[in-house]
Amino acid sequence: MTSRVDGPPKVTGRAKYGADNSLPGMVYGHVVVSTIAHGQVMAMDTAWAKSAPGVIDVYSPFNPLKLRTATSMLFGHTWVPLQDAEVAHYGQPIGLIVAETFEQARNAESLIDVTYQPRPAATSLRDSLDSAEDAPPTAQGEPPVVVELASGVGSIQEALAASPVVVEATYSTATQNHAAMEPHSAIAVWESGELTVHCGNQMAGMQAAELASALDVDASSVRVLSPFVGGAFGGKARVSVAAFLAAAAARALNRPVKVVLTREQVFTATANRPETLQKIALGASVDGTLMALRHDSWSGTPMDRSYVEPTSHTMTPKSYAIPNLAISQKMVPLNIPPTSIMRAPGEGPGSFALESAIDELAVALHMDPIELRLRNSSTAPAGSDLLWSSKHLEECYRIGAGRFGWTNRSPEGREDGDWLVGMGTATAMYPAMRFPATVMITLRADETAVVSTGGADPGTGLLTVMSLIGAESLAVPADRITPLLGDSALPPGGLSGGSTGTASVASAIMIAAAQVIDDLLGLASSPGAPFAGQEVTYTDGRVHADGRSTKFGELLREMGRESITARGSSAPGEELTKHSFSSFGAQFVEVRVHKLTRETRVTRMLGVFDAGRIINEKTARSQIMGGMIWGVSAALHERLDIEPDGRPANGDLAGYLVPVNADIPDVDVHFVQYPDTLHNPSGAKGLGEVGTVGMAAAVANAVYNATGIRVRHIPITIEDLLD
């Protein structure tokens, strides 16, 4: 197992994140946000602020920066601040103060007098269900309503009515914030008409293109640098308010501008995972064979309807073999901050409802929850003839049950002194995807190689994977590989999202390595070269011919070359017409609930995962552990409370609860390794998000096993468990 190549600079403080940079002549921007949830800014009196010490200028809808609505290659239109006076949510950016110091900019905010014309605001999902609309088609083009019925069945209601055993319930999940350690920030500088932006993001090339669109400049004139990212989870996939404002202000002032959102602003001026409401009905025969499933979902969405949490369309039609299926997805426009993708979008909250319902069905059938799941395990998504390329979920459950001691579980839980103890389980799955990626490999005369692409490593371990796959493909030691990421000037490396990074980049590395070796051999046998006219081969970092061999660096030096470079590209192709692809897993949790205080503690966790080839078990284990902890956090901690006036009641890290070390026991992770080369040449499948899926349901199922109380919303609180 290999330690992270970026570990030493991070733990020693040598790693420079976006806001760590400092440029000569740099000034500081502070974002001003709205204090109403809906209405219009009628006036902003900035005279006192502009005359305050150190203040350079104050920008607003009445003194706007030169920006326009941006277009993203993945997300469509992107909202850009200060373009009009309309207010759609509390905490919406409505101004930017630029001063010589951060303190001067921040203090000047109190000198601005804002006049609003407020309008009624819709901030509650449940109170606004009457305004629900059909969600737009999913990213895969699926309509909001999908119905698959067996021959001779007229409706999903008919299929449920014919089922001997039916469970039906409503589940809900809370609004969540990504809460990355690094707040959104940007430092922008223009030189000779070209812009450089230092900021944390998940795809430098896409950020550069989106910024260019908003600034109305050529994309080639924008460079985005993000060698280190302090957490993202989907929250830094799009250009941040900080980057838009810093770039435009730097152009207006012809000085470098630094903008860092406050922690409170991160909760309103970036994006959240929306609240969801889900109704599930499951029908089965008395032997546990599933006969019908209906899953209706409602998701909050901002007034621009820019994102909907697809809880019905993700895991539900893929997990189980069900002859009759009906799913629907609606959105409820609200005056809430932007919503966006967050770790396991759709699958995360969707699996809580689905896997809780499966557990309820197992109770109704008096059947072991694992037996019920495996009896109905799917071989392909519903309505598809494309079988899973590989699926070893049964082995995951078999190994997990043995390691966790599942046979010792009682359907009624057990007692241990003052504690009620229960076990829960759930299935995890997340689609195995990849994005087009291009990698550049440079062999150097000093016997080292540089592997570079414009993607990002927001803590996922991709830099280390690049080093290992580069070393394997070039047949050299890993310590001779220098991986480079996070620069839009490098070849496009795909988005660090959707658990796609390793599969996307590793495949491109393999192609680039083969190409650079071919080019090296061509150079070695060219006229005037050491092996001119001979048949040459390459192994272990050496060129061989006619009983002689030389290191590639020696060859380059003999040829008077400092380096040789080649590129390789890889993208999804015809495999998508032959198979369906997914990672799978089995989640196990033990909880203890105190008899008197109803305090809930997770005491044991185990996840067993089928994610193809595991390239580096150390970083892979870290990714899965993070995902499992994320699921515990959703189950017991995280909830962003929105007041009726649209104000977040707990929009900071003091009130927004996330787990600390004391909340998390030792986490056991096991991989069943079956490389899936039908998916991509490296055999790896995504694992950054599958660790999250199902965990919240497993916790809730364990709580039920311990207490006999079924909680159908998360997070679960002490109040939910009071008798």
Image (spheres, helix red, strand yellow):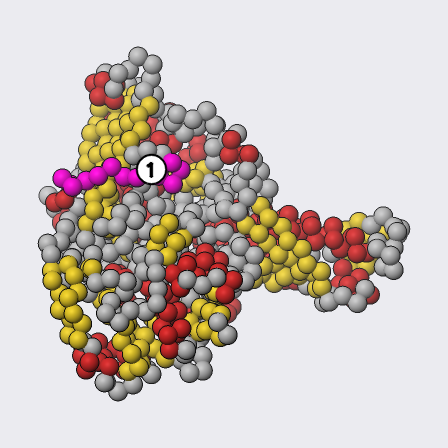
Q: Is residue 419 visible?
A: no
Residue with the mark numbered 1:
137
Q: Residue at x 13, y 69 (%)?
A: 115
Q: In the rendering, at what x and y percent does residue 41 appear?
A: 17, 65
From the viewer's perspective, is residue 532 above or below residue 583?
A: below
Q: Residue at x 30, y 47 (%)?
A: 307
Q: Residue at x 76, y 59 (%)?
A: 552
Q: Is residue 689 magenta?
A: no
Please indicate whether residue 161 sits to the left or right of residue 202 in the image: left
Residue most toward the bottom?
A: 53
Marker count (numbered)? 1
Q: Residue 547, image x and y in percent?
A: 88, 52
Q: Quadrant of residue 331?
A: top left
In terms of depth relative to the viewer, which is nearer, 327 or 291?
327
> Which one is nearer the viewer's eye here, 413 or 713?
713
Q: Position of residue 597 (x, y in %)?
A: 15, 52
Q: Name which residue type carries label 1.
A: Pro
Front residue of this view, candidates 166 and 521: 521
Furthest residue to the top? Answer: 152
**Relative depth, front residue between 207 and 18:** 207
Quadrant in the picture for residue 346: top left
Residue range of the region highlighted in magenta in the rendering: 129-141
Q: Quadrant of the N terminus?
A: bottom right
Callout 1: few (<14), some (14-19), or many (20+) C-alpha neighbours within 10 Å? few
Q: Which residue: 26% across, 47% down?
A: 305
449 vs 254: above or below? above
* Relative horizontal placement of residue 537, taking residue 308 as reference (left or right): right
Secondary structure state at the residue bearing disc 1: loop
Quarter placement of the C terminus: top left
Residue 73 visible at all: yes
Spot occupied by residue 8 in the image (x, y as percentages of width and height)? 51, 68
Q: Main secondary structure of the magenta part?
A: loop
